Image (cartoon, coloured by chain):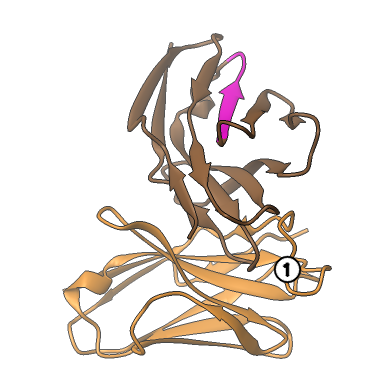
Amino acid sequence: KAGVTQTPRYLIKTRGQQVTLSCSPISGHRSVSWYQQTPGQGLQFLFEYFSETQRNKGNFPGRFSGRQFSNSRSEMNVSTLELGDSALYLCASSLDVLRGGGNNEKLFFGSGTQLSVL
Amino acid sequence: AQKITQTQPGMFVQEKEAVTLDCTYDTSDPSYGLFWYKQPSSGEMIFLIYQGSYDQQNATEGRYSLNFQKARKSANLVISASQLGDSAMYFCAMKAGANNLFFGTGTRLTVIP
């Protein structure tokens, strides 16, 4: 069974540009969530999608957005990039067999997209 | 609010020895889940072990075991018989309510041959 796939693996952008990251969850997984990892702030939750709807959102500015498609694949977009957006962006998927996401739902992560903003 | 604390930025262990990575947590929600993930230099977060707040027994997965002390709000990871491939960052995380994880700051484990 294929794991969570994130593309691209590496990305270099300049300030002011926008970027789109892609995530394909494990087959059958319906929940997709995104996390940002930086040396200074650690791992922070961005948002979670389930059945094409954003179900939960972290504390990030509106420049960060996402969406989920009918096949559960997800994309996240960052507009007007800033230097501080340089980070590893991790996508995670889970089965979510329990409505609303149970506390025992294991999240499985991809290898991430390393974004560098110059 | 949920909070996860990992007080050990780095740990060293001799190959084949056991090591304990500390994790304490705080939440007002009586129902929560505790997770440990391993992150090698490749970046992928690898799920290791899970403990539910209502689980009576400590979780075990192969060489990994979770020392869950609910009254102390601690969920330490024990790795037995350390291997060189265990060298990585280890993150403790918690879920309470919503389906997202709160992570600690991580512990970098180095296994010495």
Q: Position of residue A24 (x, y in %)?
A: 63, 74
Q: Is residue B16 magenta?
A: no
Q: Amino acid at mark 1?
A: Gly
The picture's colour for chain B is brown
- Residue B75: percent from the left, percent from the top? 58, 34
Residue lying farthest to the right in this orientation: A97
Q: Which chain did the renderer colour orange?
A: A
As helix, strand or loop, the secondary structure at mark 1 comes to loop
Residue B14 in which image quadrant: top left
Q: Which residue lies at the image location 68% right of the left edge and 59% below the top edge?
A: A3
The residue stretch that appears in magenta? B74-81
Q: Is residue B105 above or below residue B80?
A: below
- Residue at x 74% of width, y 26% of height: B62
Left or right position of B58 against B107: right
Asked whether A69 or B53 is in front, the reply is B53
Residue A97 quadrant? bottom right
Q: Which residue is mark 1?
A: A101
Q: How many marks?
A: 1
**Principal secondary structure, stretch drawn in magenta:** strand
Q: Chain of mark 1?
A: A
